[in-house]
Each structure stands twice: as structure tokens, then as C-alpha cells.
Image (tube, rainbow, N blue to C red):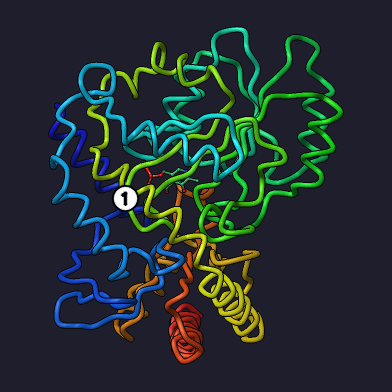
Amino acid sequence: MFAERIKNRLLNQHNAGLYRKPVEINKRQEKYFFIGNRKVLNFASNDYLGLGVSDKLKRKVSGNFLKYATSSSSSRLVSGNYSVINQAEKEYARFFGYEDALFFPSGYQANIGIVSALFEKGDLLIFDKHIHASSVKGMLLSGADFHGYNHNSMSHLCKWLEKTSKNKPAVLTESLFSMDGDFLDVQGFKALKERFDFFSIVDEAHAFGATGENGKGIARDVADIGVGTFGKALGLFGAFVLMPADFKEYFFNFSSPLIYTTSLPEAHAASAIDLLGIISQCEKQRKHLREISSLTKEKLVYEGFCVKGDAHILAVEIGDENRALEISERLLEENIFVLPARYPTVPLHKAMLRIGMTALHTEKDVRKLVSSLKEAYGKIEKKDR
Ligand SMILES: Cc1ncc(COP(=O)(O)O)c(C=O)c1O
């Protein structure tokens, strides 16, 4: 019975153009991947500052792994609560301007861990319809009621807030949206927060490190809780949640995804501390990232593509899932690695090509991307006519 179900579901997935299969990468080198016998230019990563391949960070991290044990070998609440982790959390809270911080093994776990623990039946959560799957999963697990507002629509959010008569609601959003690549309307959000006094959780996974002064993101002013991951601009792995005082104690007691998992090792925390110094010094990379991203968008729009994105994530609207997949395959033939984002990551029939710009990309890379995309798109249009 289960075997039959698996077969049928995979077949349906294929037919709908939604089938997923990870591409096997033999090697990563700077901004390139080696896939099969090809050397391809990578436009599908979140390594916005290029730190994931930086020798400086590699040396720091490997030094830390030589100094400390390879694993914490326990959950935080048993024997995995090392001084260096607490020190790193304090430094993250101070750097990003919050009272406290807590590390999680991943951003996915962090969102589930905080949202499911903070809220309960009877609470009301209002969320941007484009927030990450992990926050949605957290809401489902919490038992609270939740309503989505149209993506980045402050007027729609306002309508929901006006309708709520009971306890103060909580609002969940991202500061730089992972798929659309647009920024939260921080001023609009701030005005609503002042008017309705709601509690806010702002996921800055794609903003921390890459945006704001010294990489501090854009939403400190409007976030009660800020969520960051190490796996994107910070070039490491794991996640951090920035929060008011007392919350950490609460999560240690009530957040099951934190309580029942092995904590990140000491070497991670020591590397996280090193990273704060590194990201403060990445102004040159952030400037280049802004400029090269804006140039890419400009060139794509000039070629007639519909492109969303205010910063280093650019979403080229395609619509049909199979077409998006085919364009991505043709780009790979041209040694360009760009992946389609498809349902359920984005709404059905709103497939897009998600371009992740990094500080490693050059104008030449952008020219190659744009001309290959133009050619691939043109060929497919012609074939479909
Ligand atoms: C907005 C957002 N939050 C959280 C996550 C999860 O982070 P991690 O990859 O560390 O699990 C992602 C990852 O894709 C994301 O885009």
C-alpha cells in the first residue's frame, strides 16, 4: 500500500512539473560548481558575501575544530551547555542590539522551536503569506489561530489588526523575503506596530550579514524577536535567535526542538564569535553585492524579463512549472546554475527562476547569465509556439 502510494505521488509530481531531484555537485570552488564534467557558474547559493569559500574563515573554523571536541555529544540541557556557546550568544545579542540570543542547529529548527513554544490555542498569529515553511510549521504546531495577509501588504495587515478584538496578536514576517527578494516595508510595519502594539517575529535569514550597517540587517527597530541563520551570508551552519531577556529561560523549558536535539559544538560557537569580526569588515563585499545585484536586475529588465527583488535575491517570473524547469536545464547546458522555485515553495503556476547573487560575481558573469537566459527563454518560446 505504501509502495503504491509513493509511486503514484512521485508520478503526479513528475506530471505536474513539480518533481524534485537534487543535483549532485562534485566540487565547489569559489563561485563555480563542478557538475558531471562541467564547470558551472553558480547563481543558486545564499553565500551572499562569499564567506562560505573564504580561506580566512576556513582557517578560523578548522583551528576551532582542532582546539575543541568535534561534537557537543549532548543536548544543551544535558551536557551540551558550554561556556563558549553562552559567550557567543551574549556577543550576538550585543552585536545585533538585542537583550539575549540563543543558537539552534538550523534556521528551520529555530523557527519551529520559537513559534511552536511561544504560542498556544487561543492566541492569534497574523503572518505574511510568503513567510518561510518553517514558520508556517511552527504556527501549525502551536495550536494558535492564524491568518495570512497578502505579501508585504501593510493595508491588508492593517485590516486583520483592526478586526482583532481579543488579546494582542503576534505578527510574523521576513525582512528580506527568501523567494521574492523584496524588503519588508519597515516604515509601514513600524507605524502599524506603534498603532496596534503587536508582538513581532522577523526572520532576517537573508538580510543578516548582507544588509544594514555592519551587516546588522534592517529590522531591529520593528522586531521583538529576530531570526538569523549562519548558513547564508555568514558562510557557516546553524542559526541564532535574538530575543528579549527571560525568553531564553522559557525556550530551555518549553521549546521541544531545542530541548531534544544535540547542541552545536563549541567549535561552532568559537567560529561564530570570529565571524562577528569578519562580517563587520565586509563593507566592500556588501557594496559590491548591492551594485552587482542592481546591475543584474537592470540588465534582465532591459531584456524584457519580469524581475522581482530589491537586493541580492532576484526572482525572474516564469509561471509554468515545466517551462521554468526547462529553462534551468538549458542554462545548465550553458554552464550556468540557476534553479526554478516551484510550488509549494511559491504559489502554483507562479514558478520563477531564483537568482542568488554573491559578492564573488563580476560584470562578466552577469553578461553571461543574461545572454544565456535570453537565449534559453527564446528557444523555449519558439518551441512552444
Ligand atoms: C527565511 C528563511 N528562514 C529560515 C530558513 C532556514 O534556515 P536553515 O537553512 O538554517 O535551516 C531559510 C532557509 O532557506 C529561510 O529562507
Image side of residue 299 versus residue 330, left or right = right
Between 269 and 160, the one nearer to me in the picture = 269
Q: Is residue 51 above or below residue 12?
A: below
Residue drawn at point x = 64 percent, y = 30 percent: 224
Residue 382 appears in the figure:
no
> Regarding mark 1 in the picture, which secondary structure is present there?
helix
Location of residue 182 in the rendering, given as x and y in whole percent from the top left corner: 64, 57
The answer to which quarter of the image holds residue 108 is top left
Q: Is residue 147 above or below residue 345?
A: above
Between 88 and 296, the one nearer to me in the picture = 88
Residue drawn at point x = 62 percent, y = 33 percent: 172
Residue 22 appears in the figure:
yes
Residue drawn at point x = 35 percent, y = 74 percent: 42
Q: Is residue 98 above or below residue 300?
A: above
Give the residue at mark 1.
271
The answer to which quarter of the image holds residue 163 is top right
Location of residue 36 in the rendering, given as x and y in whole percent from the top left corner: 15, 76
Q: Residues within 10 Å of mark 1 (few under 14, many from 20)?
A: many
Location of residue 105 in the rendering, given as x and y in whole percent from the top left corner: 31, 36
Location of residue 166 in the rendering, given as x and y in whole percent from the top left corner: 76, 9
Between 76 and 91, the one nearer to me in the picture = 91
Between 17 and 43, the one nearer to me in the picture = 43
Q: Mark 1 and ligand 1: say if the CB distance to the nearest ligand atom is below 8 Å.
A: no
